[in-house]
Amino acid sequence: MSIMVGHTSPAPPAPGTGPGRRAGARAWRAVAALGVLASGVVHVLLWLQGYADIAVVGPLFLLNGVAAAVLTVLLLGWRHWLPLVGGIAFGGATLLAFVLSTTVGFYGVSETFAGTEELVAAGAEVVAVVASTLALVREHGR
């Protein structure tokens, strides 16, 4: 009988934590980054098309575009939970502001829920929230 001293076999990965789960989380991060970026691009385009002249809302549209660019880089380059929470907050806050502008008004701006820019931005914000949430759950959920 032989006893192997010092030999240990590697522990199997915990359920749901293998390479497939990490790859899925990376894919959802990329989708979240695309959603955030698309929303930011729409806001910068609208800012360039005249929203820059609207008090409060104009600067917020430009800030949205800059924040989207920064958050996109963070989502793709920093494997931490903070950018994912940022994707959820960004998409949620931007979508909330849009809903307010289509219902009760937002800083004097009243929009309609129609038009290509509005639909693209709203869809992108939903994608940012959902994809960031799924990536967060896949990376950090139990």
Image (cartoon, rainbow, N blue to C red):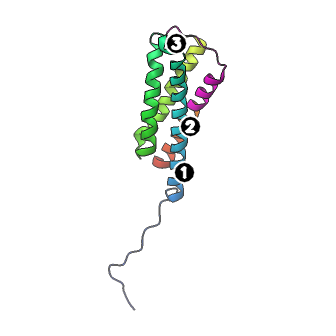
The residue tagged 2 is: 130
Estimate how packed mark 1 is, as few (under 14), some (14 to 19) or many (20 or more) residues with alpha carbons within 10 Å. some
Q: Can you see residue 15? A: no
Measure the alpha-carbon separation of dots 1 and 2: 14 Å
Residue 78 location, quadrant: top left
Estimate how packed mark 2 is, as few (under 14), some (14 to 19) or many (20 or more) residues with alpha carbons within 10 Å. many
Amino acid at circle 3: Phe
Q: Which mark is residue 106?
A: 3
The magenta segment is: 107-125
At mark 1, the secondary structure is: helix
> In the image, is residue 123 part of the stretch drawn in magenta?
yes
The residue tagged 1 is: 24
Front in this rendered view, residue 65 or 112: 65
Amino acid at circle 2: Val
Q: Earlier in the sequence, mark 1 or mark 2?
A: 1
Determine the residue positioned at 65% across, 24% down: 116
Q: Can you see residue 69? A: yes
At mark 2, the secondary structure is: helix
**Residue 16's spot in the image, x, y percent?**
52, 56
**Residue most toward the bottom?**
1
